[in-house]
Image (cartoon, grey):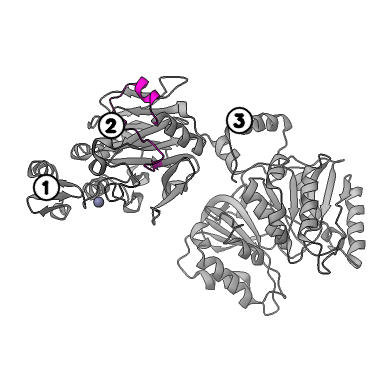
Amino acid sequence: MDLLNENIIHVKNKNIEYLQFKKLLQYPEIKYAYVIGLDKNFKISLEPKNDEEKIKNNLSKKSYKEICDELNIKYKNIVNTDQSHTDNIQIIKNKINNDKPDFNLYKNTDGLITNKKNIILSTINADCILLVFYDPIKKVIANVHSGWRGTIKRISVKTIEKMKEEYNCNPQDIICCMSPSIRKCHFEVDNDVYQIFKNEYKDLKNFDELAVKNNDKWNIDTIEINRTILKNAGLKKENIIDSGICSVCNKNLIHSYRGMGEEAGRATQIISLIWKWEIEMEKNMKPNKLKKGDTIGVVAPSDPIVGEKINEIKMAKNIIEKKGFKVKFSKNLFSNTNGYSSTAREKADDINDMFADKSVKMIWCAKGGENSNSVFDYLDFDLIKNNPKIICGYSDITSITNVINNKTGLVTFSGTNFKTIATDETDYSLNEVIKRFVECDLMLGNVEDKDITIKEGQAEGILIGGNLSLIYGLVCGKYAIDFQNKILFLEELGYESEPALVSNHLYYLKQNGVFDKIKGLWIGNYEHETEISLESIVLDVLGDDIEFPIIKSNYFGHTEKKTVIPIGTMARIDTSLDKKIILTENCVENIPIVKEVIDNIKSKFLKFKK
Ligand SMILES: [Zn+2]
């Protein structure tokens, strides 16, 4: 069974099962999970008053470890409290234990707040509401247990007050997410408890809707009570996010005291802020820079290199050698086994071999075409991950660079193909390659290259993209790439791609949610004989209610001017500036010694996307 809904995702792995709020997933600097799964996690009832020895000996330690491993955070950094139905909230400035969790070291406490990185705030429940708070501006997190007694004591609002007082948080910025808990459908109380609620909350305009009489009992909506008082405390409506899940209704998946009685285990909710360098490492792995004298490996995963093109490849080789590099051709570079291209195996073998070859420092794709996606099943992603290096190409190569980035975390590049440097009339594109890979320069295009605003705004996100008709093929299915929070760059071949076909592809992206996920759109070159522009098609497809900025530049795509765009590093769009898009982090590593240290840390603590 799946608990997925508009606000949460449900992750099921072999050993661990948990929920995450989609809203919180937008912030890479926090790690969050609400662990569920009766048959897997926190099976043994964990009473809050248990001493540490008892916790050590039961299954919950294993469950805590599993969720920490899953999120790449450290078990020893957990802090929790005894959860005594109080309204006491503790600011955590430091861990108490160095080498083990701080289990139950805070007595008579039900809430924890911190702005310290790598401290994991943890709460447990079996029907009570758990509230998690995040202020993305001040970078403050809180994890709070609000059973019905806590709700009577308004611990949720007291948390906001404490965040204001201690960290100067603005309630307008604070996000609050509400865990699965007992809901109005099952939270049935006697008259005495109803009177306590009425006494505390009679001033709420909608109190009569929140407490409904049911024979001689009352059903009370503690979620709506918390939502109302949080709104009154200044939180924005859209920042109060409810899981919408009743623990009793779902007692086959979620620990529920009312559902299970004394046998019930406990679900746990954890949240932690992490260091920026951990985020950087998780999201990408940068190849080493290129130096004069290095060997560049050339592969042809698209069109076959036959006829006139063989000469052009040789001319390109001369140009590159004159620039001071060595050039190595792949085994199947000139193969045309199928009559329309080499086989998928031949192409993939060449790419794998180039990654494995220690003497090769950069892999350059010879030319575009139609079917570089044929290699996907035969690429050795583990090998690529273990031998990161620059790989560059554009047009049909879009498929390979985006899929490698998505599967391995390696930063790849959209830039000129190898053969094109021999046929281009200027050396603009070649200079961009040298600038990016050898000089580690972050400037996109030249000073005189203009960016045009199509839709105003600011955005920051990781770049992905390339040729529209290839990105189209990566929206769904086995090799789908992740568009969430990305800045998407798109270009399209003019003349061969009719405006109606461009519209078709853009509608497909729209219908499959791509434009609900991205943070910004960067349009490149498209020249059609009708003079219909790519931006006019984009605006027609997207309509008026776009929330992200759109800019347009003429220095990438099927044009003489092809800057090198990293796939997998951060960029920022700001339409109020002349230069409307900038790269905000290095895309190649230029300090090898630091890379070794980082690799070492990486191998110890971090796993990359599968
Ligand atoms: Zn229910």
User: How many residues crowd mark 3 within 10 Å: few (<14), some (14–19), many (20+)?
Assistant: few
Q: Is residue 464 visible?
A: yes
427 or 382: nearer the eye?
A: 382
- Residue at x 37%, y 45% (from the top left corner): 173
Q: Is residue 22 visible?
A: no
Question: Is the Cβ of the residue at disc 1 closer than 8 Å to that at disc 3?
Answer: no
SS for callout 3: helix
Residue range (magenta): 34-59
Mark in front: 3 vs 2: 3
Which circle's residue, 3 or 2, is located before the other in the chain? 2
Corner quadrant of residue 142: top left
Three-letter amino acid code at the position of disc 1: Lys
Q: Which mark is residue 604?
A: 3
**Is residue 406 located in the magenta-colored stretch of the structure?**
no
Residue bearing mark 2: 110
Asked if disc 2 is less than 8 Å from ligand 1, the answer is no
581 or 220: nearer the eye?
A: 220
SS for callout 1: loop
- Residue at x 40%, y 30% (from the top left corner): 59
Mark 3 vs mark 2, CA separation in Å: 34 Å
Q: Is residue 516 left or right of residue 469?
A: left
Please tell me whether residue 51 is drawn above or below residue 267 in the rendered image.
above
Residue bearing mark 1: 202
**Is residue 54 located in the magenta-colored stretch of the structure?**
yes
